Amino acid sequence: MFDQALPRRHVLQAGLGLAGLAAAPFGSRALAADEGDSIIAAAKGIGNTDLKAIMWSNYFVPMKPPIEEFRKATGIAITNIKDLSTPTIPQAAMAEALTRSPDFDIVHLGSEMIPSLVSAGYLEPLDEYMHKANYKMDAVGDYANLATYDGKTYGIITDGNIFVHQLRKDLFENADNKKKFEDKFGKPLAYPKTWDDEFQQMKFFHNPEKGIYGSGNLRSRGFGYPWFLMYLYSFGGFPFDPDMKPTVYGEAGKRAIEVYLRDKEVAFPDSPTWGTSQMIGHITAGDVYSCQYWGGLIKLQENPAKSKTAGKWTYGLVPGGEANGKPLYRAAGMPVVCLMVNRNSPHKAAAAYMACWLGTEKASSQIVSDRVNSFNDAWTKQEMTDPRVVQAYTPGGIKAIQENLQVSSPNIYLTGNQEFVDVLDKNLGQGYLGQLKADEVLKQIDADFAKVVKRIGTAKLKKDYKTYAAIMPKAMQPA
Amino acid sequence: MTETLAGIAPAEAAAARRDVSRSEAVRRFKWMILAPLLLLLFSLLTPVLLLQLYFSFHQWTVYLSSWWNADFAGLDIFQSVFTDPRFGWAVLRSLAFAGGSTIGCFVIGFLLAYLIYRPFRGQALYYALFIVPMLTVPIVIAYTGQMLLDRSGPLNDILSRLTGHDIQVLWLSNPDIALLTVTLLDIWNWTPFSFIIMLAGLSALPKEPVEAAQILGASSWRIFWEVQLPLLRPVILLALVLRFLDAMGAFPIIWGLLQGGPGTATETLGVYIYITTWQDFNVSLGAAQSYVTMMMMVVIVLVAIRLLRREKRSLDTMYAGPREADGAI
Amino acid sequence: MTKSRQRRAATIARYAVLTVWAAIVIFPLYWIVATSFKPQDQWFSWPPVYLPSPPTLENYRDVWLGATSFEHGGQTALSLQTPFLALRNSLILAFGATTLAVLYGSIIAYGVSRYRLLSETRMFQLLMLRMVPPIVIVAPLSLYFSYIGLLDSMIGLGIMYFLTSLPYAVWMTKSFIDEVPREVEQAAEILGASRWRTVFEVVLPLIRSGLVATFMFILILNWSEYLLALILSKTHVVTLPVELSKFEGSTEGRLFGRQAALSVGITLPLIIVGLFIRKHLARGFSFGMVRR
C-alpha cells in the first residue's frame, strides 16, 4: 500500500511543478487563464469528493458545466443540493450552524448573513485557500469587500446583485414629453440625478388611466427595506454610531423616510404586498416608467421572447442624495449571493477550492451570461468587457452595472441581520400603510434596534460595526 | 361486559376464579395497547417540553454561546412577551381569524349539508365537488390565491363583469381587508370539513320527531328550528370546536400568501412565533411565546372539552334506554 | 297548485345555491390547472388570461422531467431537480404514518370501547395532541431531534405525523367500533379466539369502510403538512409541500407556472382517491356525536 502511494505523490508533485512552469512564460495575459489551473493544482491532491450544498436549484443549473469541468480535473463536484428558495436559505443555514452540523459543505446565500454565521461558528475563512490556489476575487470597485468580515474573506461571489436605475427610454426621449415637461417645470427632462428629480419625473409620467405607473420600486415586507437603506446611505446616514446607538432618527433618516413613503403617490396600489414576481411582470409589460432594480432584470427585459419592452430602456446610475452639500450615490448591493464553506465540514478544503473555481473569470462569465437561467449576475472586472456577458446585458446595461457596482452599499452587516431586517420590515411596512407617521417609524426603528442590540450584546456588535463601516463604498460617486 | 359474562358462567366459584384471571388478562391487554403510546409520548414530549421551559427562562443568544451556556433570565422573557404589543395583536388576529373561519365554514357547510342531505338528482355530483377543497394542499391554495386575488387578477375581473362596475379591490394589499382575505381562503379550504360533519348529523337524525311534527301541521321552518336544530346540537358544537382549534394553528395559508404582511396585518400567532424563532433566531423569546400560546390553547381546549362532554353525556342518556333494551334481548 | 309552485321554487333555489358554491369550488382549481399550461407572460397579465393561449407543456416538462436533459433554443432551461424524491418521501411518509396511526388508533379505540382503556377525560386530552399547534414545539423539537439523530430522517418526521394523527384515528374509529354488536366478539371468544385475533379478524374487518374513511381523512392531513416537514428536514426527507415553496427567488420572484404544474401533480392523486371513497367519508366524521 505504502509503496504504491509514494510514487503517486511524486508524480503528482512533478505534475504540479510542470503546471507552474508551463504557466510562467505567458505573462500577465495568461494569469487569468492560469487562475483556474492553480486552483486545480491546489485541489488535485484531495481526491474524489462529493460535496453537498444548500443552494437554490435555479442558481445551480448554470453552474453545472463548470462544476463538471472541475470534476474531470480534480474529482471534486457538488453532487447533492438542498434545493431551497433563496428567502428560506438563511433560516436553513442558521439551523445548521446552531447544531454545528457537518452535513453540508457549502451554503449559497446572501453575504449579509456572514456576520451571524461566523459568530455562530459556522463559516471557514477562505483567504488561506485563495492564497494557495492563487485566486483573487477580481470584483469591480470594492464589491468584493461585501463578502468579508473582520478582514477575512468568507464568501466567493457568484451573483453580483446590484441596483441599477432603469428608465423608459421611449417615454423619456419622446420629444412631445420633453416639451411638456419643460413647459411645466421650466427645466429640461434630463436623466434624474437626485431622488427629487426622479420623483418629479415619476409624478409627471404617472398615469394609471393609461396603464403607466411612475414607480416600479418595491415596498412590501421582505422586499422594501433595501430601498430605505439605499436612501439612508445616500443622504449620508448610517443606522448606528460607533457605540452601536441607533441613529436612524436623524436628518438623513428623515429625508430617507420621506423618499420611501412618497413613492406611494406614484406606485401601484398593490405595492404593499407586491414582491418581484408581480412587479417584474409589470415592468416587462411596459407599465412602469422608472425604478431601481437588480441588474439581472436587464437580461430578462432585453430578451424579446420574454419581454414586451426589449430595447425600450435606458440604464444608469441610481439617483443620489447629498451629504455635506456634495452629491452622494449609493446603490443597494444586496443580497450579494456567495458560496460559503462550512467550518465543520470534513471536506472544507475541497469545498473552498470548488468555490474559488466557480468564482474564476472563466467560470463566472459563463455562469452570468446565461440568459435563461438569469439568476446569477455579472460582478467581475473582466465580465464587464466579455462579449457574451455584454450581449446578455446590452452594452448600456453592463455599463450601468459597472457604475453602480462602484458605489454598492451593503445590507445591515451585523450579527443578527435578520432581526434588524425584521425591525425595518415591520416599521417601514406600518409606515407605508399609514399606521405610523414618518417620524414615528424612525423612532420606532431606533427603539426596536436598541432592543436587538442589547440582546445580541453591545460589545459584540461594536466589533461588527467596524466591518460594517469598512465595507461601505469609499467613493462618493463612480469614477 | 362482565355482567353478561357472569350470566353465562355456570358455577359461581369457577366464575369468580375465571373473573380474577380474566381481569388480570384484561389488564395486561390494556397495558399492551397503551405501553407503546406512553413510551413514545414520554421519550418525545418530556425532553421537548423541558427544553422549551429551559429556553423560556434562559436568554440564549444564538450567536454568542451554546444553548447550555445561556444566561438565566428569570421571568424577564415572559415579561417581554406580555409587554409586547405585537404579541397582543397577534393573539387578537389569531382569534379573529379562527373565529371568522369557524363561523364561515359552519354557516356555509350547514347550509350546503341541509340542501343536499335528502336524495335528489345530482346529489352525488354536488357532494363529490363540495369535498374537493379539503383535498387540496393549503400551501397550494396560498400560492394560487396570490394570482386569483391580485388587483388585476381574475377575481376582480369576474366581479367587474358581473356587476358592470370596475371593481379593483385590493384583496391582499389593503391592510384592512388582508386578514379577511386569508380567512375567506381558509373558509374555502375547510368548509368541506364542517359540511361533512353536518351531513353526518343531518342524515342520522331520527325520522319520527319530524314526521310527528309534520302530522301536527308544523311548517318546515318551525320543524327545522324546534325539532331538528336541538337534536343537532352536539354535532354543531363538534363542528365548531374542531374547526376553531384547527384554525388557531393555521400556518401555511397565511405564511404562503402574505408572510404576515402587508405591514403586520396578517401576523397571527403562528406567523409571529415563526418569525421570532426562525427568522430572528430569538429562540428564547419564541419559546416563551410558545408557552404562553400553549397555555392559552390548553385553556380553550379544556373549555371545549367541558362543552363537548356535556353534550355527549346528554346524548348518552338520551340513547341509553333503547340500547340497554337491545342488550337484554 | 301553490304548493307545487312553492316546491318548484324551492328546488330551483336549491340548485342555484349549490351551483354557485360549486362554481366557487371549481374556479380556483381550474385556475391552477390553467396556469400550469401558461407561458410566463400570462401568469400575471391584465386582463387575466382564462384560457392559456397557446397552451404550453413547458412547465410540466421543466418540473417533472427536470430541465437539464432538455435543450431549448441552445440554452438550458430553469429548474433542475425532479420532484420524484419528494414524491417518494411524501408517499412513504403519508401512507406509512397514516396506516400505522389508523391501525394503532383502532386498537386503542377498541380498548376504549370495550374495556374503558381511557376515561372520557383522557380521550379528550388525547385530542389535545392534535389541537396544540405544532409551531409551539417545533424549535426545541428540532434541537432534540438533531441530538438523537432523528432530524432529516423518515422516522423522525414519521413519528410526528403518527402522533399528531393518532387522536383523530382513535376518535373516528371508536365511533365505528361502538356500533359493532358485542355478541360477535363474544361468539369469537367462546370459540377460543384470543383478544388480539378477535380485534384483527373480527372487529376491524367489520368496520372496513370506517377505517377507509379515517385513513383517507388522516392521509389528507399528512399529505399536505407543511411546517413540520419544512423544519425537520434537510435533504433526505423533503416532502412535496416543501418542494412547492422552492419556486421562488429573492430577486426573481415566484415561478407560478412551474409551481402550478407541480401543484396539479400533488393535488390530483388525493382528489381521485378522495372521490373514490367519498361515501365513506361522511360517516367517519361524526366522532361519536351522532347515533344511528
Image (cartoon, coloured by chain):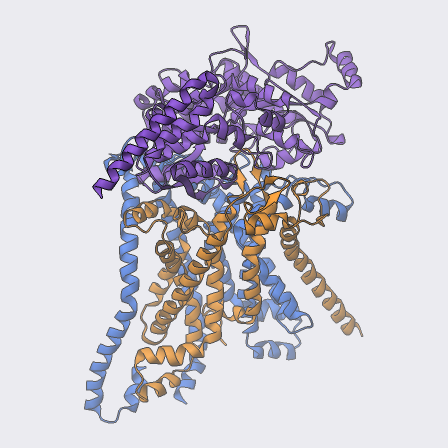
- What residue sits 66% from the left and 25% below the top? A266
- For this orientation, the residue located farthest to the bottom is B10
Vertical relation: B269 (above or below) C289: above
- Chain C, hue in figure: orange
- Chain B, hue in figure: blue
Q: Is residue A200 left or right of residue A415?
A: right
- What residue sits 44% from the left and 72% below the top? C175
Vertical relation: C220 (above or below) C235: below
Q: Is residue A17 at all visible to an observer of this figure?
A: yes
Q: Which chain is purple?
A: A
Q: Is residue C153 left or right of residue C250?
A: left
Vertical relation: A448 (above or below) C260: above
Q: Please provide percent x and percent y for residue C4.
A: 77, 74
Q: Please provide percent x and percent y for residue C259.
A: 57, 47
Vertical relation: A370 (above or below) B2: above
Where does the C terminus of chain B fall, quadrant-wise? bottom left
Quarter residue A346 falls in: top left
Name the foreground residue: B76 vs C74: C74
Q: Please provide percent x and percent y for residue A85.
A: 49, 40
Name the foreground residue: A382 vs A55: A382
- What residue sits 49% from the left and 11% below the top? A475
Where does the N terminus of chain B fall, quadrant-wise? bottom left
Q: Please provide percent x and percent y for residue C100.
A: 38, 65
